[in-house]
Amino acid sequence: MPAQPSVPALLSTLRTRQATSPALIWYGPGGERIELSGKVLDNWVAKTSNLLVDELDAEPGIRVRLDLPAHWKTLVWALAAWQTGCTVQLGEPAHPGDAAAGGAVPDVTVTASQELLDAAEGTVVAVAQGALELRWPGELPAGAVDYAAEVRSYADTYLSGEEAEEGYTALHSFLGTGLNLSYGQLAEAADGGMCQTLLVPAAVDLPSVLTAALRTWAAGGSVVLVAADVEITERLLAAEKVTERLEA
């Protein structure tokens, strides 16, 4: 039986066998279309991984809360967190007791919300969503990291550090019915995909977006991610040669 596709192995595939083919296409609310080849996607993940390690002291077991909508930068952050062995946390516990049970208190909060940026405790990263935004458009609290302004200065290759063990938590979600995956289970979730062009509407819950993207990339396919305000037309489907759609 072939080895299951870990995130480092998946990224190696993206920068070699899928280097020049589209891996991720984003249709944004401002009418922008952003296409990332496998190599370019890997470069963004490497830069973000280096920022995580060098600026935010990331290491296996660190909890990174992604308070972000379905967006191409959200996928980059999830891959970078998993490449550095972190636990990706989605949402927040409905009851205080859930925090203790799920290890929910994040070490790093990554957000596109000014409100959470101002209220969050600990290390906070502000992620501007606009295609042309080179820095956070609002007020930055003292000590907050401006992702758009900082990330480009980091190397576009990542020298692998300590990797998370299979039993470490890779994904802990408080969204919907909740989802808790170890690194071993994350590799299983990435297995069994097809080489296809997968359309992912913004209405799909984020845990499903992340696992579907992993399966698609591991099989050599590409992901078309569409913002909530973008109409999915027959012209769009034909232009991107979409072969499958992820349903909400």
Image (cartoon, grey):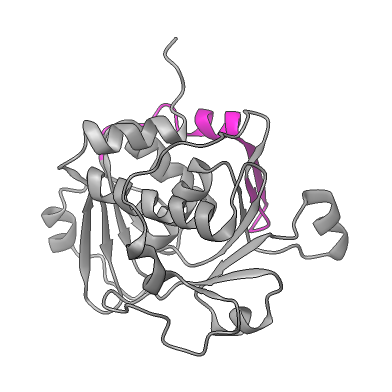
Q: In this view of the protein, which residue sits in the foreground, 111 or 55?
A: 55
Residue drawn at x 60%, y 77% as measured from the top left: 143
* Image location of residue 15, percent across then percent down: 26, 38
- Give the left or right position of residue 111, taking residue 74 as reference: right
Identify whether 241 is placed above or below 35. Answer: above
Q: In this view of the protein, which residue sits in the foreground, 133 or 157?
A: 157
Asked if residue 192 is among those painted magenta in the image, a careful observer would answer yes
Residue drawn at x 25%, y 65% as measured from the top left: 232
- Give the left or right position of residue 118, taking residue 36 as reference: right
* Image location of residue 227, percent across then percent down: 35, 68
| Residue 248 appears anywhere in the view | no
- Give the left or right position of residue 39, taking residue 94 as reference: left
Position of the N terminus, as image quadrant, is top left
Residue drawn at x 30%, y 32% as measured from the top left: 13
* Image location of residue 33, percent across then percent down: 20, 66
Q: In this view of the protein, which residue sits in the foreground, 53 or 167?
A: 53
Q: In this view of the protein, which residue sits in the foreground, 162 or 93?
A: 162
Q: Quadrant of residue 219?
A: top left
Q: Quadrant of residue 162?
A: top right
Magenta segment: 171-196
Asked if residue 30 is among those painted magenta in the image, a careful observer would answer no
* Image location of residue 206, percent across then percent down: 51, 56
Identify whether 115 is placed above or below 166. Answer: below
Residue lying furthest right in this view? Answer: 97
Residue drawn at x 41%, y 39% as measured from the top left: 159
